[in-house]
Amino acid sequence: MSAHELDAAGIHAPALRAAYRHCRSLNSAHGRTYFLATRMLPAARRPAVHALYGLARQVDDIVDDPTNTLGPETRRRLLDELAGELDAALSGDHGDSPVVTAVVDTARRYGIRKEYFDSFMRSMRQDLTVSDYPDRASLNAYVHGSAEVIGLQVLPVLGTEVPAEQAAPYAAALGNAFQLTNFLRDVGEDLRRGRVYLPADELAVFGVDRRRLQQCLLDGRPDRQVRRALADQVARTRAVYHYAAPGIDLLDPIARPCVSTAYTLYGEILDRIVESDYDVFAHRISVPGPRRLGVALAGAAGVANARIRSRSAGTGKHVSSYSTLGGR
């Protein structure tokens, strides 16, 4: 993380600067789309987003164990230890790990509710024991903690032109849409971990169950029923994007290009899934680099225009109800 970003954010203590740098390194290494979009925010707001991403990344690495070296009990212990440290630090104690240090500082600066972090940890614990979701309601309960609260955490960092509670449902919905997109992209990867993040009753309408999905994973391609079921899931996810879209215009104008970029690139993952004929078993589908760059350049132009309009107005307008969304 550049000294410019940390200085702009008013982060001066050496240990705190190191903590934020650690979170930025996690974001740049693992969250290509998210990191690219974050680059469009004003420098002062980027460290906070990196911190929030860093927490999500660290928890994911515990739960999913990319090294495949941790047993269930070890993963549970590590998650409990991290959750306990975060809870204590948010309540006023000192955090030891760099991610917790940065996240707690961000939460205090922006008044992010402690309950959002509690909900996130509850959903992450589910990943240690829950491998299937019987219906949309059960999946939505999980996604609220795993993704919707992320949107609510980030909202005060982005800022809004309306009372924050007016923008909150759209921020939560966009987090939901991004998570549902990940579920569709990662069907094969999740199956290898023993999980299915698609509602069983909705799949059953098309004659699809875990056993059929597992067979498609073994075959390396979807069959007709699975393609139809995945098409239905894509349509449902697009509906969530459609609902979330008006919320972008409720944000601080300087933050809109960042969110629009993420909205576009995540949405295009769905396009790529459809173009692949729903082949989410043999390889991980992504938006090609040149397309990501093109969307990013358009977003950068939007940032420049927003800054010009802000200077012309003579106010550098930034209206956001931090205390409404958060504050313990």
Image (spheres, helix red, strand yellow):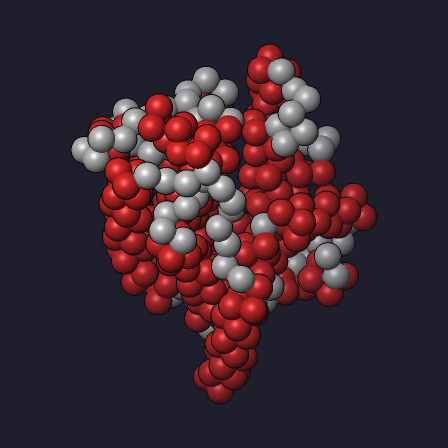
Query: Is 278 positioned to the left or the right of 103 in the image?
Result: left
Quadrant showing the N terminus: bottom right
Q: Is residue 86 at all visible to an observer of this figure?
A: no
**Where residue 162 appears, x then y in whole percent?**
34, 62
Q: Nearer the viewer, residue 50 or 238?
A: 238
Q: Is residue 12 at all visible to an observer of this figure?
A: yes
Vertical position of residue 196 compared to residue 223: above or below? above
The quarter of the displayed image where residue 134 is located: top left
Vertical position of residue 148 compared to residue 145: above or below? below
**Where residue 15 appears, x then y in whole percent?**
78, 43
Rendered residue at 28%/41% (across/down)? 224
Residue situated furthest front in the rendering: 219
Number of numbered markers: 0
Vertical position of residue 314 compared to residue 195: above or below? below
**Where residue 213 appears, x then y in whole percent?**
37, 31
Rendered residue at 75%/61% (across/down)? 2
